[in-house]
Amino acid sequence: MIKYSKDHEWIRVDGDQGVVGISDYAQESLGDIVFVELPEVGASFSSKDEVAVVESVKAASEIYTPVGGEITAVNKDLAGDLSLVNSSPMEGGWFYKIKISDLSELDRLMDEAAYNKYVETLS
């Protein structure tokens, strides 16, 4: 199951584990990524907290966690290849993994169809 936030983060959920990244729309809006600051493994965050920063040739943007929980892993591949965020935002370009503390927080996020409708309103 994949859910989306209005801030253009996605979370792929398996049980109480989530993998988080930015949507294709977000990476297209930002342009070529030149820097990513990831959270620390073991850090805990509440839903909607700023957890990471991404900078592109166009702008800097904060990444907010769509759900609260503890960071269990970060994507170390990004350190060597930031282009993964642009070329594979939903697969190889993920940012971090999180152990979700409250699964009910997923209910306020959008499914893919709802997110796509939301993005259409932004154009």
Image: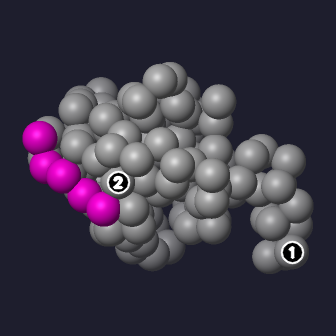
Mark 2 surroundings: few (<14), some (14-19) or many (≥20) residues within 10 A: many
Q: Residue drawn at (40%, 47%), measured in percent from left and top?
A: 102
Rendered image: mark on residue 121: 1
Position of the C terminus, as image quadrant, is bottom right
> Which secondary structure type mostly characterizes the magenta part of the structure?
loop
Choose between 108 and 91: the one closer to the eye.
108
Residue 78 in view, yes or no? no
Mark 1 surroundings: few (<14), some (14-19) or many (≥20) residues within 10 A: few
Above or below, 56 relative to 10: below
Amino acid carrying mark 2 in the image: Gly
Q: Relative to residue 5, is residue 100 drawn left or right?
A: left
Rendered image: mark on residue 75: none
Above or below, 36 relative to 92: below
Percent x, y of residue 6:
63, 67
Percent x, y of residue 40:
13, 47
Task: Answer whether residue 23 is magenta in the image.
Answer: no
Percent x, y of residue 117:
88, 61
Percent x, y of residue 99:
31, 35
Amino acid carrying mark 1 in the image: Thr
Rendered image: mark on residue 68: 2
Task: Answer whether residue 45 is magenta in the image.
Answer: yes
Q: In whole angstroms, how far apart are the C-alphas of marks 1 and 2?
A: 27 Å
Residue at disc 2, secondary structure:
loop
Q: Which residues are magenta?
A: 42-46
Q: Which sits earlier in the primary sequence, circle 1 or circle 2? A: 2
Q: Residue drawn at (24%, 50%), measured in percent from left and top?
A: 38
Q: Give the image quarter of residue 118.
A: bottom right
Above or below, 56 relative to 44: below
